[in-house]
Image (cartoon, helix red, strand yellow):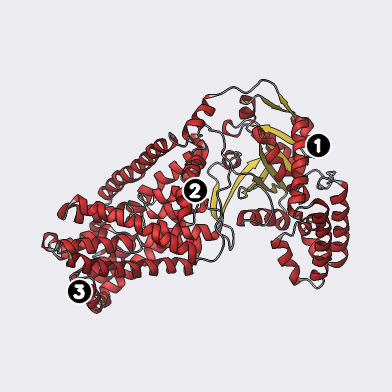
C-alpha cells in the first residue's frame, strides 16, 4: 500500500520556494485560486520512496499576522488543514529576517523541516551557516539546499518523510519569550483553554494566546462566535495594556521586537563571516539598475524589450496560427454539411470552432510569451527593481510600483495583464490595477487604431489617441483611488539578489499557468461565441443593431452599420475593423467617424477573454462592473469626441 503525504511549502517571497516546488513536482501541477480568495493556489504531486506526496505551495509571506490575504491563507492552511509536514524555505544569505517567520511556524506547532536555501549566494557574501547548530536551536531538521541546481532536494524530501512518519517525534512548541511576555502568554493560554476549549481544539492554544496579545484582527473577529469570546478578549487586552504601559509601545510591536531579538541571536550563533564581502558583478549590476538616474533608461530598455517580445512576437505567432487555422472553417463546413442542416453547421462552425480558434490565435500568442517573461523576471530578481523605480509615479493613482508591470504588459494583451495584477498585495489594489489595465490599448485594439486612424487620418491622430488613453488611465485611476473603500498600501518589499533564471523553472511555470488559463477561460470564450452566433442566426442581433441606431447615428455620429462590428468586437477587437470594412468602404468614412469609432473600440472592454480573466480573478460582480463601466465610458467619451471634433471641423 502506498502511503499518502501532504507537504506545505512556506517562506518569504524570493527565497526560491517556487523553484523548490517546481523541482519537486515538475509538470504534475495544477494552479487555481484558494477558495474565496484571489490568491493563487499551486499544488503538485510526486512519488518518492514508495510515498505519494502532494505538495502545496503556500503564498509567499513575511509573517503569519493578519495584514494581508496571503498571511491569512498560509496560517489557516497550516493550522486548520494540518499538513503532515511544513517545509520552511529560508534564504541563507538573509537568515535573521527569514527566521522571524520560522518562529511563527513553530508557534503553530507544525511538523517542521527547514530548507536552508541559497547557501551558494550566502557563500558569495562570505557567510557560512552552521546547519547542525541551527537545527539544534530550532529543534527541527535543517537541510542546506541550492534549489536552482537541485542540490539537497532529495535530502530535504527524506527529512520531510522522516518527520511525517516518526512516531516518536516530540510535538513542536514555539520558542520561549522573555520573562515578562512569557508570563502573560501563559496566563492567556490557560484562560483560553478553560473558557474556549472549542477554539483551542482548532488552533494551538499558545498561538491563540500570542495572537490575542498581538491584537490580531482576524482572530479577534473569530472570538465573537464563541460564548465566552468577549470575556477572553477583555482578559487578553488587559494584559496587552500592561505590556504597552511597561514598554511604551503597542503590544504587536513589543512581541515583534522580541521575535526579532531571538532571530538575531540565532543568526549570530550560527553564522560565520569567512571573508569580507567583495563588490561582485551582482552588486555592481544592482547599483546601476536601481540608480536614481541610470536606472530609468535601463528600465526603458527593458520595457521596450518586453513590449517587443509580447507585442511584435505575439503578432507573428498570431499570424502564423491564423494561417494554420485559415481553412479550418471551410473544412468543417464541407465535412458537416451533408449530415446537418445549415443553421447547425453555422452554429458549430462560427460558434464553437471560431471561439476556440479565436482563443488559440489571439490569446495564446500573447499569454505564453507573457508567462515566460514573467517567470524570467521572477527568477532573475529584476521585477522588484522595476517596481522600486516606478513607485513614485504609480502612487499618483493610488497604486505602488509593482502595478507598473501589468500596466505595460497590457499593451500586448489585456488577459495576462489582468492576471499579472496578482502581484499586488490586497484585493483592493488588485481590483484597482485591473480597472486601469483594461483601459490600456492591447495589440488587438492597436490594429484598429493604426489600421483605421493611422492609415486614413494620419499617424499624428493615432498617437493622439494613445496619449489621450494615458491621460484617461491617470484620471480614472485617481477617481477610483478616491472612491474605492480601504487604505492604500505602500511599497514594502525585499530587493533580492540577482540570480540566473532556471530554464526548467521558467518552462514549468509557463506550462502550469498556460494550462490553467486554457481550462478556465476557453469554456467561457466558446459559450460567448455560441451565444452571439445564436443571436445572429435567429435575427435578434439585427434587431439589436436597428434598435441601437439612435445611439450610433445620433450620439456617436457613426453609421448604423457600425453596430454589428462593435457587438462582435466583444469576441476580438480585430473583428470590428474586419466587419466594418465588409459593411462599408473604409475610405468613405469621414475622419471624425474613424477617430470616434477607434476611440470607442479602444475604451470599451477589450474582449470576452478579458472578461473571463476578470471573472476568474474577482468574480462575476466586479468583472461585470468593469465591463459596463468601460462600455458606458466608451460611448460617453465617443459622443463628446464627436461633438468636439465637429466643432473644430476635423
Q: Residue at x 31, y 51 (%)?
A: 443
298 horizontally vs 539: left or right: right
Q: Is residue 45 above or below residue 567?
A: above
110 horizontally vs 67: left or right: right
Q: Position of residue 282 (x, y in %)?
A: 53, 28
- Element class at badge 3: helix
- Element class at badge 1: helix
Residue 50 in view: no
Quote the CA–CA distance across marks 2 and 3: 42 Å
Q: Position of residue 643 (x, y in %)?
A: 21, 69
In primary-sequence order, the first of circles 2 and 3 is: 2
Q: Is residue 19 above or below residue 129?
A: below
Quote the CA–CA distance across marks 1 and 3: 77 Å
- Reading the image, the residue beneath label 2 is 402
Q: Position of residue 38 (x, y in %)?
A: 55, 59
Quote the CA–CA distance across marks 2 and 1: 37 Å
* Nearer to me, 3 or 187: 187
Q: Residue at x 43, y 59 (%)?
A: 477
- Residue density around tag 3, few if under 14, some if 14–19, many if 20 or more, within 10 Å: some
Which quadrant does the C terminus fall into?
bottom left
Q: Residue at x 87, y 63 (%)?
A: 191
Q: Is residue 29 above or below residue 214?
A: above
In primary-sequence order, the first of circles 2 and 1 is: 1
- Element class at badge 2: helix
Q: Position of residue 312 (x, y in %)?
A: 30, 43
Q: Residue at x 73, y 41 (%)?
A: 113
- Reading the image, the residue beneath label 1 is 137
| Residue 82 placement: quadrant | bottom right
| Contact check, label 2 and label 1, Cβ < 8 Å | no
| Residue 373 placement: quadrant | top left
- Residue density around tag 2, few if under 14, some if 14–19, many if 20 or more, within 10 Å: many
Amino acid at each position: 500500500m502506498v502511503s499518502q503525504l501532504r507537504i506545505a511549502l512556506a517562506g518569504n517571497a524570493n527565497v526560491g520556494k517556487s523553484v523548490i516546488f517546481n523541482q519537486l513536482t515538475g509538470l504534475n501541477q495544477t494552479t487555481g485560486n484558494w477558495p474565496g480568495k484571489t490568491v493563487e493556489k499551486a499544488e503538485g504531486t510526486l512519488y518518492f520512496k514508495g510515498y505519494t506526496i502532494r505538495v502545496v505551495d503556500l503564498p509567499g509571506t513575511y509573517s503569519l499576522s493578519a495584514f494581508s490575504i496571503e498571511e491569512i491563507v498560509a496560517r489557516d492552511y497550516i493550522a486548520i488543514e494540518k499538513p503532515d509536514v511544513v517545509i520552511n524555505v529560508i534564504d541563507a544569505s538573509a537568515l535573521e529576517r527569514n527566521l522571524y517567520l520560522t518562529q511563527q511556524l513553530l508557534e503553530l506547532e507544525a511538523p517542521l523541516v527547514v530548507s536552508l536555501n541559497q547557501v551558494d549566494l550566502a557563500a558569495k557574501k562570505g557567510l557560512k551557516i552552521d546547519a547542525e547548530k541551527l537545527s539544534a536551536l530550532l529543534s527541527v531538521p535543517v537541510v542546506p539546499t541550492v534549489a536552482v541546481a537541485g542540490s539537497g532536494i532529495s535530502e530535504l524530501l527524506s527529512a520531510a518523510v522522516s518527520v511525517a512518519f516518526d512516531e516518536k517525534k516530540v510535538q513542536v512548541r514555539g520558542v520561549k519569550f522573555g520573562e515578562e511576555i512569557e508570563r502573560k502568554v501563559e496566563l492567556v493560554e490557560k484562560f483560553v483553554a478553560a473558557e474556549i476549549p472549542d477554539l483551542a481544539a482548532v488552533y494551538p492554544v499558545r498561538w491563540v494566546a500570542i495572537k490575542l496579545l498581538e491584537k490580531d484582527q482576524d482572530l479577534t473577529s473569530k472570538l465573537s462566535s464563541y460564548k465566552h469570546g468577549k470575556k477572553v478578549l477583555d482578559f487578553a487586552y488587559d494584559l496587552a495594556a500592561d505590556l504597552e504601559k511597561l514598554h511604551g509601545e503597542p503590544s504587536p510591536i513589543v512581541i515583534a521586537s522580541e521575535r526579532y531579538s531571538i532571530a538575531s541571536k540565532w543568526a549570530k550563533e550560527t553564522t560565520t563571516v569567512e571573508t569580507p564581502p567583495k563588490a561582485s558583478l551582482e552588486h555592481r549590476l544592482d547599483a546601476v539598475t536601481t540608480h536614481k538616474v541610470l536606472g530609468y533608461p535601463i528600465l526603458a530598455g527593458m520595457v521596450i524589450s518586453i513590449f517587443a517580445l509580447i507585442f511584435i512576437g505575439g503578432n507573428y505567432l498570431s499570424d502564423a496560427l491564423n494561417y494554420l487555422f485559415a481553412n479550418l472553417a471551410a473544412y468543417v463546413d464541407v465535412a458537416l454539411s451533408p449530415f446537418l442542416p445549415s443553421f447547425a453547421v453555422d452554429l458549430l462552425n462560427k460558434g464553437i470552432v471560431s471561439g476556440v480558434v479565436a482563443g488559440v490565435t489571439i490569446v495564446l500568442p500573447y499569454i505564453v510569451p507573457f508567462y515566460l517573461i514573467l517567470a524570467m523576471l521572477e527568477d532573475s530578481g529584476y521585477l522588484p527593481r522595476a517596481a522600486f523605480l516606478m513607485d513614485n509615479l504609480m502612487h499618483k493613482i493610488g497604486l505602488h510600483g509593482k502595478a507598473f508591470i501589468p500596466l505595460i504588459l497590457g499593451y500586448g494583451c489585456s488577459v495576462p495583464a489582468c492576471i499579472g495584477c496578482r502581484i499586488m498585495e490586497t484585493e483592493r489594489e488588485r481590483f484597482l490595477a485591473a480597472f486601469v489595465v483594461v483601459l490600456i490599448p492591447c495589440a488587438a485594439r492597436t490594429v484598429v487604431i493604426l489600421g483605421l486612424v493611422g492609415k486614413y487620418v494620419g499617424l499624428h491622430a493615432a498617437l493622439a489617441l494613445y496619449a489621450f488613453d494615458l491621460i484617461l488611465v491617470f484620471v480614472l485611476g485617481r477617481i477610483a483611488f478616491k472612491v474605492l473603500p480601504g487604505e492604500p498600501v505602500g511599497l514594502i518589499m525585499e530587493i533580492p539578489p540577482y540570480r540566473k533564471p532556471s530554464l526548467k523553472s521558467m518552462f514549468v511555470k509557463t506550462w502550469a499557468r498556460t494550462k490553467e488559463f486554457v481550462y478556465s477561460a476557453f469554456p467561457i470564450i466558446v459559450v460567448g461565441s455560441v451565444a452571439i452566433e445564436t443571436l445572429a442566426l435567429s435575427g435578434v442581433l439585427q434587431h439589436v443593431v436597428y434598435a441601437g441606431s439612435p445611439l450610433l447615428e445620433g450620439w456617436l455620429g457613426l453609421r448604423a452599420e457600425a453596430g454589428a462590428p462593435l457587438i462582435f468586437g466583444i469576441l476580438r477587437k480585430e473583428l470590428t475593423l474586419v466587419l466594418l470594412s465588409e459593411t462599408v468602404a473604409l475610405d468613405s468614412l469621414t475622419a471624425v467617424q474613424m477617430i470616434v469609432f477607434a476611440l470607442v473600440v479602444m475604451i470599451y472592454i477589450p474582449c470576452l477573454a478579458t472578461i473571463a480573466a476578470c471573472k476568474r480573478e474577482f468574480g462575476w460582480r466586479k468583472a461585470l462592473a468593469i465591463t459596463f463601466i468601460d462600455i458606458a465610458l466608451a460611448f460617453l467619451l465617443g459622443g463628446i469626441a464627436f461633438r468636439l471634433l465637429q466643432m473644430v471641423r476635423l
